[in-house]
Amino acid sequence: QVQLVESGGDLVQPGGSLRLSCEASGRVFTIYAMGWYRQAPGKERELVAQITRDDSTTYADSVKGRFTISRDSTTTTSTVYLQMNSLKPEDTAVYYCNALAIDVYWGQGTQVTVSS
């Protein structure tokens, strides 16, 4: 089993920055990729960014050049970060951490609101 705990969501003005964190614990050695998804009201959940065990990254076109995903691992935890810069109102959503192992794991979600 893998447990995911997210933090960092907040209210921010357009053009501002936020950093989301997601710490994975448990059988972290089974994880081969971690990522962030988001879901805005009335919309489907979509991939924002993903990073693999060998640090290969993938980004949604809408966030390329503005968001950066990174990770840090120890023997007992694996943490993935999402640095979000130049935030836009359309980035407003609940952001979910995701871990791919033998099973798929999800965090509880953290709200990001971009508004003046």
Image (cartoon, rainbow, N blue to C red):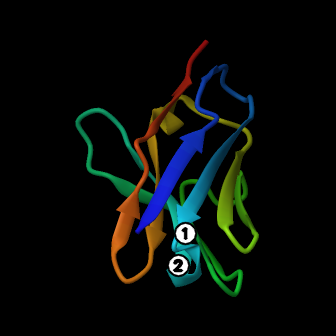
Residue 77, above or below 114: below
Is 16 on the left or on the right of 99, as rendered? right
Distance, label 2 to label 1, CA atoms, is 7 Å
| Residue that numbered label 2 is attached to | 31
Task: Find residue 23 and report its image quarter.
Answer: bottom right
Task: Find residue 81 and report its image quarter.
Answer: bottom right
Q: Tag count in the figure?
A: 2
Q: Are marks 2 and 1 in contact (CB under 8 Å)?
A: yes
Q: Residues within 10 Å of mark 1 (few under 14, many from 20)?
A: many
Q: Residues within 10 Å of mark 2 (few under 14, many from 20)?
A: some
Residue 111, above or below 59: above
Residue 37 x %, y %: 44, 55
Amino acid type shown at disc 1: Met
SS at badge 1:
strand
SS at badge 2:
loop
Is 105 on the left or on the right of 69, as rendered? left
Residue 72 x %, y %: 76, 66
Is 67 on the left or on the right of 36, as rendered? right
Front residue (pair 51, 76): 76
Residue 49 at least partly seen: no
| Residue that numbered label 1 is attached to | 34
Is 108 on the left or on the right of 23, as rendered? left
- Tell me which residue sits at (57%, 61%) in the image: 25
- Tell me which residue sits at (43%, 79%) in the image: 101
Residue 34 at least partly seen: yes
- Tell me which residue sits at (47%, 57%) in the image: 3
Amino acid type shown at disc 2: Ile
